[in-house]
Image (spheres, grey):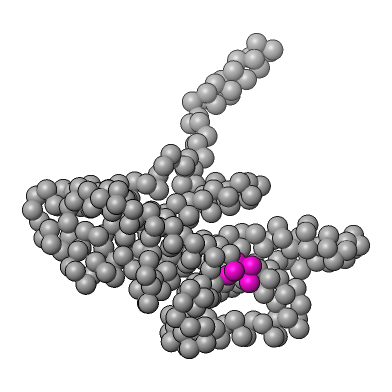
């Protein structure tokens, strides 16, 4: 009797070996980050530019070949023109960026943490956002003169608006349950800001910071063509008058490199500061 039972048990268990294995879980994430992946697009664009120039598909007077632009850049660097213009542009962009950064963060905190501040600040900033910033140039020239001050002021406005908007949106999006928890725990105002407000606002702040960095370079291109005697924009404006497209491309390449490097630096800082987050990009 026991032998029959054992045989039946064996027969019953045996088919389980033929059942298909559990399917492997489908991976929906983008996958592992590729090294230097963000350089693939610019390198591909450069390769297409070089190939089209070598094949004679581009007019050299309108779009010079990459090697022509490199030779022109080397010549401008050797005679001292390019280093001077780069240093001047960096000083203008850095000064306006720092002022805009401080203004955007301070205004966002004042508006996001106080109903009175929100009533006084948020509507004014959104009104400023609705006005084209470059359209303020004639008015700022009348107020501040034609020198460096109005250029720095315009760059600061271009920078502070995205920083304010994104930081304020992040502050407004903090879950109210965290506020209630902080009240139950008896946190002081300073501890509440340090432990809850700042971590909650950092993702939005970094988004605004990246937009502000890019905006500072975009504004600088236009401003340096207005009554300037140095800077990359001035160099490009002078090259336009003499039909030197290779010099113009040198300026554009330098602007692009600065923009890419500064954006990558902000991304790196963001990844380090927000290493506790688990997102698709990480």
Where is residue 261? Give x, y as percent: 44, 51
Where is residue 80? Give x, y as percent: 33, 53
Residue at the extreme front of the image, as rendered: 79
The quarter holding residue 197 reads bottom right
Question: What secondary structure is the magenta-colored segment mainly?
Answer: helix
Q: Residue at x 21, y 72 (%)?
A: 241
The quarter holding residue 236 reads bottom left
Q: Residue at x 64, y 67 (%)?
A: 102
Q: Residue at x 78, y 63 (%)?
A: 193
Horizontal relation, residue 12 to residue 226: left or right: right
Residue 77's place in the image compared with 9, above or below, is below
The quarter holding residue 156 reads bottom right
Q: Is residue 68 magenta?
A: no
Residue 203's place in the image compared with 169, above or below, is above
Task: Indicate the quadrant containing the N terminus: top left, top right, bottom left or bottom right.
Answer: top right
Where is residue 279? Give x, y as percent: 57, 50
Horizontal relation, residue 158 to residue 111: left or right: left
Residue 28 in view (yes/no): no
Where is residue 198? Give x, y as percent: 72, 60
Q: Which residues are magenta?
A: 99-103
Residue 8's place in the image compared with 76, above or below, is above
């Amino acid at each position: 009797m026991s032998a029959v039972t054992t045989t039946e048990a064996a027969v019953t268990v045996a088919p389980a070996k033929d059942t298909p294995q559990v399917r492997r879980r489908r991976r929906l994430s983008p996958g592992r980050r590729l090294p230097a992946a963000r350089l693939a697009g610019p390198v591909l664009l450069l390769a297409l530019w070089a190939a089209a120039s070598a094949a004679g598909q581009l007019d050299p007077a309108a779009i010079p070949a990459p090697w022509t632009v490199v030779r022109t850049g080397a010549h401008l660097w050797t005679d001292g023109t390019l280093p001077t213009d780069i240093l001047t542009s960096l000083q203008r962009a850095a000064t306006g960026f720092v002022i805009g950064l401080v203004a955007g963060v301070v205004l966002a905190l004042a508006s996001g943490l106080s109903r009175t501040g929100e009533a006084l600040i948020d509507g004014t900033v959104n009104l400023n956002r609705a006005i084209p910033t470059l359209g303020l140039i004639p008015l700022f020239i009348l107020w501040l003169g034609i020198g460096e001050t109005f250029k720095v002021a315009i760059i600061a406005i271009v920078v502070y608006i995205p920083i304010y908007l994104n930081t304020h949106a992040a502050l407004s999006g903090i879950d109210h349950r965290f506020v209630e928890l902080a009240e139950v725990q008896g946190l002081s105002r300073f501890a509440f800001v340090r432990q809850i407000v700042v971590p909650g606002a950092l993702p939005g702040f970094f988004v605004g910071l990246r937009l502000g960095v890019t905006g500072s370079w975009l504004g600088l291109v236009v401003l340096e063509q207005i009554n300037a005697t140095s800077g990359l924009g001035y160099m490009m404006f002078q090259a336009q008058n003499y039909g030197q497209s290779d010099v113009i491309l040198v300026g554009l390449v330098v602007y692009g490199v600065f923009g890419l490097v500064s954006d990558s630096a902000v991304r790196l800082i963001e990844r380090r500061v927000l290493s506790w987050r688990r997102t698709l990009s990480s």
